[in-house]
Amino acid sequence: MKPTFSYTYLPSIDDLVARIEADSRAFAVVAISGFGGAGKSTLASALGGRLGAPVVSIDEFGTPGALLRSDNWSGFDRPRL
């Protein structure tokens, strides 16, 4: 499925759920990124609720201060991640 996102078109939650549910794979991992305050957690909660899927934050895998630098992944629990 080719993504059709652009700055002028933002899919609705219904569109995103339909795209994920239409995928023929047994499961999907959906990653959401963006700037602080952009609504990542809100979107993840909405998608997780609609799909009946768990929402896991990267914060749950890091040690204190691990997220201060995006280029340093040494503070993350790699086996669990």
Image (cartoon, rainbow, N blue to C red):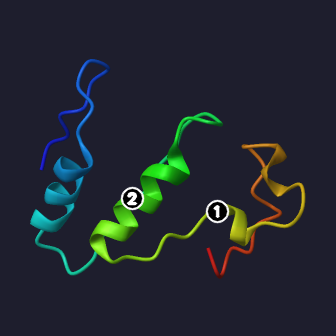
Give the residue drawn at x 23%, y 38%.
11
Whichever of labels 1 and 2 marks the residue nearer the N terminus, that label is 2
Q: Is residue 29 visible?
A: no
Give the crowd class for mark 1: few <14, some 14-19, many >=20 residues within 10 Å.
Answer: few
Out of 28 and 10, give the one closest to the viewer: 10
Q: Position of residue 35 (x, y in %)?
A: 60, 33
Residue 81 falls in image quadrant = bottom right
Viewer can see residue 69:
yes
Q: Residue 21: percent from the left, percent from the top?
A: 16, 67
| Above or below, comparing residue 41 to residue 38 in the picture | below
Hey, which residue is sitting farthest top in the picture? 8
Q: Residue at x 24, y 42 (%)?
A: 12
Does dot 1 land on a helix, a strand or a loop? helix
Image point (37%, 76%), residue name: 53
Q: Amino acid at mark 2?
A: Ala
In the rendered structure, which amino acid carries the disc numbered 1? Ile
Q: Secondary structure at mark 2?
A: helix
Residue 59, position as x, y percentages in the image: 71, 62
The residue beneath circle 2 is 46
Q: Which residue is mark 1?
A: 58
Judge from the rendering whether residue 77 lies leftward or rightward of residue 5; answer left or right.
right
The total number of labels drawn is 2
Residue that protrudes farthest toward the right in the picture = 64
For residue 45, side relative to residue 22 (left or right): right
